[in-house]
Image (spheres, rainbow, N blue to C red):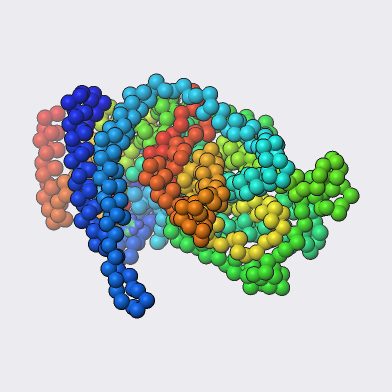
Amino acid sequence: MSNISNTHESAGRNLTARALREGFFAALVALGLFVLFVGLETTQNIRNELVLNQRWGLLAVFVIVAAVGRFLSVAYIRPWMAARKAAATSKAPAEAEESFFKRNFSKIAIAALLVYPPLMVMLFGVQGSLKWVDNFGIQILIYVMLAWGLNIVVGLAGLLDLGYVAFYAVGAYSYALLSQQFGLSFWVLLPLSGILAAFWGIILGFPVLRLKGDYLAIVTLAFGEIIRLVLINWTEVTRGTFGVSGIPKASVFGIWSFDVGAANYFPKVFGLAMSSAYYKIFLFYLILALALLTAYVTIRLRRMPIGRAWEALREDEIACRSLGINTVTTKLTAFATGAMFGGFAGSFFAVRQGFVSPESFVFLESAIILAIVVLGGMGSLVGIAIAAVVMIGGTELLREMQFLKQIFGPEFTPELYRMLIFGLAMVIVMVWKPRGFVGSREPTAFLKERKAVSGTFTTEGHG
Amino acid sequence: MTPGTNTMTNDPILKVEHLSMRFGGLMAINDFSFEAQRGDITALIGPNGAGKTTVFNCVTGFYKPTMGMITMRQKEGKSFLLERMADFEITRDAKVARTFQNIRLFSGLTVLENLLVAQHNMLMKASGYTFLGLLGFPAYKKASGESVEIAKYWLEKAHLIERADDPAGDLPYGAQRRLEIARAMCTGPEFLCLDEPAAGLNPRESLALNELLRSIRKDSGTSILLIEHDMSVVMEISDHVVVLEYGQKISDGTPDYVKNDPKVIAAYLGVEDDEVEEVIEEIEEIEETQGGKH
Ligand SMILES: Nc1ncnc2c1ncn2[C@@H]1O[C@H](COP(=O)(O)OP(=O)(O)O)[C@@H](O)[C@H]1O
Ligand SMILES: [Mg+2]
């Protein structure tokens, strides 16, 4: 196996022979394993009698898959992987020059996002663009923003927070309740929701941040649940499981409104046909701006002493204290900053849905956001954005795959399988890239050249 | 005055009085007192498990001592009772820095970033606790430039300038030791505590370390407290040696005095208490014969 790169003809024949042999053995093993599980099936008939069904065809499929899979793996996939690895190690120093695309990835991505809604309108018409802008664009961007916010806590400061959705909820209910009770506008409540969420982050942080690792994770998880239970049971204020509906829409800085009856109704002012698509396009740009703000602040903070202290905290808390860093306030600022962006995203969520209920803030949401951060590569903004697109975009795509009904029958609903696929994807990515899509770390300062720090040196944090 | 001390001035920077530290039933430090003079390199030596690291952890606030008083007096005369302060306050306010027996670097940060993290408190103030810095105020830009200069100064001294942009975890062992010392110096300490800095170094790295320590004392006027269990290193560079065994002080004085102290020799040769008399006699004999030769 070791000298695959200089494969001679005889070696190639040897390899094929070995692959055939291993394929045969795999077939034998599969046959032995599945002959009783798959080949024979017992069912009860109407008279409650056990009937033995023989399924030799299905068994044959299993065995053939095993044999062919093993053959392909030994004969082609493994040599190909080894050759690629050898090529990568020999080429690594020469490949310092990155491609234009890779260097300017974020600029290209932002430009693409800016033209995305008009492009969708052009391709699918005003009404047809709704799905692409709302279900894909806005949905993914919300998760990008949430994951970038959580990244400050988990990826930078190394504090495992399983209750991040609590701050999302605080933001959403802050907007929902305050806009209904006091008639405040979105542009007043957006910063206020962030501040309230940050405030809750600090309240939670004080008692909790003395804990480390697993204990911190469990307590934050509990906090997330507490917030949700309060939302369910404090019915006088939150209307419990019914949720808050009829949440006012946002306006374009108070100049144009999206309420159909209003004098300054956006499509009316611009002489466009009445459609909710314009509101969605506005929301798209709004969440894009919020997400980019999160990224910008994160990038700036990383180059400030506080951001460096967060990363140092992730690497070694005791060393931090020996350098005179107050680790409690440092952790609190990370928690509060992360919570603040969660709050912003929450108030956006409320404005987009027009309805909030405790059901939107279950633990699963926290888990998904955390999964995106981990998959993307903790600390890497680009990696996290890619992970959000793959994960959220992928699950949304499942909804579109109605053709699967033709294969699996009419009662097959593909979106029910999204958690299964989500989990499978996570396992695959973690095996293939244990540090996430982007495992390396960009240094925040340099003397001569900025060299990415390989993931093998960074730690995930214990607190 | 302690026997054999030849320092004329008595200006202690650190005074440890009746320090005791108990872990459950174990008395790791028992009524231990010593002074470290300003400008000196003081060495704390003793066999493994004697309690040296524990003394360090008490001085730097990582342990709260069971009993005793630890006083740090700064150049301008300000005094701090270290046993009452939190660990990070001891570095930030009392200006005592330390390294660890098992190196604790931020291995995923670059060498330069390690030194910038050490200047956290100065930079935090300069950036108006992040807010002014975020808004791009010039004061932070200036301070940030200065912090890089300070880092560069220490990188030159520790012979690490070539590796400034590499991850700290990628450095060889000896370089990591020097980086940890450079990082501690970047906090701007008056008193530097080093826990076995020469452990595991090869002779060449050991020499580089000694040179670094001497230049720290000479150029920045920082007093040094040094743990070693290897006597030969200590004798090279220290002005004053304190010997600890089973949590108790057994000797205190100049390197020459300590080297010939029978109790120290007994502790290092690992003899039983009742054999100490014998050892002392033997040593006296040896000294007599040596004296005869002179
Ligand atoms: N945190 C602790 N808990 C319990 N025992 C400890 C602790 N730290 C040190 N000790 C004990 O105190 C004694 C002195 O240890 P230490 O100070 O590390 O010795 P040295 O640094 O001189 O080799 C040892 O017996 C050690 O087991
Ligand atoms: Mg020790």
Marks counted in the figure total 0
Q: Is residue A55 above or below residue A437?
A: below
The residue shown at (56%, 28%) is: A104
Horizontal and vertical percent for residue A336? 60, 52
Q: Residue furthest bottom?
A: A47
Q: Nearer the viewer, residue A132 or B146?
A: A132
* Quadrant where the N terminus of chain A is found in the figure: top left
Taking the image as shown, residue B223 lies to the left or right of residue A347, namely left
Instruction: Identify the residue at horizontal 63%, vertical 33% (top origin).
Output: A112
Q: Quadrant of residue B78?
A: top right
Which residue occupies the foreground of this view, A40 or A288? Answer: A40
Q: Nearer the viewer, residue A175 or A265?
A: A265
**Residue A379 drawn at (x, y percent):** 50, 42
Q: Position of residue B63 (x, y in %)?
A: 41, 55
Q: Position of residue B287 (x, y in %)?
A: 14, 38
Asked whether the viewer can see residue A121, the reply is yes
